[in-house]
Image (tube, rainbow, N blue to C red):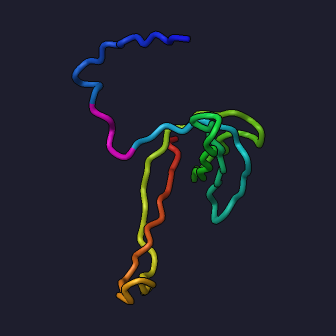
Amino acid sequence: MSASVQSVPVSQSSSKPTAMVIFIRGKVEGLRRFDGKRYTRIITPAPDAYSRPQVVEIRSVQKLADIGDETEVTCRLGGYTRKAYRATDKDTGETTSIIPVDLTLDALE
């Protein structure tokens, strides 16, 4: 079985990605509202038969889709740091400060 790959010419201006903008495609698994915003949980297709699909949550003002619908959303990637905590390495006994980072996805509406 062989697959053919076609090269598509890309203009110089469109070859640069837009900063922090990503495209999500998947099936809506859950919806919730909090503090005037809507949160849509989307499960994405697995890359192959032996890996797990990814699950993301997108924040928006408007409803993106209903549960069970397949959808495509363009989002802005963001993030913030949470409270630092200390962790000790079991092998060396060294204590380090860990600063967790949470990523956010906001729908471009």
- Asked whether residue 12 is drawn in magenta, I would say no
At x 40% / y 78%, what residue is drawn?
98
User: In front: 94, or 84?
Assistant: 94
The residue at the point 47 percent across, 59 percent down is 103
Q: Residue at x 62, y 57 (%)?
A: 37
Q: From the viewer's perspective, tell me whether residue 25 is left or right of residue 101.
A: right
Measured from the top left, where is residue 48 in percent x and y?
60, 34
**Seen in the image, is 3 located left or right of residue 49?**
left
Q: Residue furthest front?
A: 91
83 or 74: nearer the viewer = 83
Residue 1 sits above or below residue 30 on the image: above
Measuring from the top left, give residue 58's x and y in whole percent: 58, 50
Q: Is residue 51 above or below residue 34?
A: above
State how many labels appear: 0
Q: Is most of the magenta stretch helix, strand or loop? A: loop
Rendered image quadrant of residue 45: top right
Does residue 17 belong to the magenta stretch? yes
Displayed quadrant of residue 52: top right
Residue pushed farthest left? Answer: 12
State left or right for residue 100 relative to residue 68.
left
Quarter of the image that includes the N terminus: top right
Residue 90 position (above or below residue 60): below
To which quarter of the image does residue 91 belong? bottom left
Task: Locate residue 20, reporting x and y percent.
Answer: 37, 46
Q: Nearer the viewer, residue 51 or 101?
A: 51
Which region is colored magenta? 16-20
Image position, residue 85 (x, y; %): 44, 84
Q: Residue at x 36, y 84 (%)?
A: 96
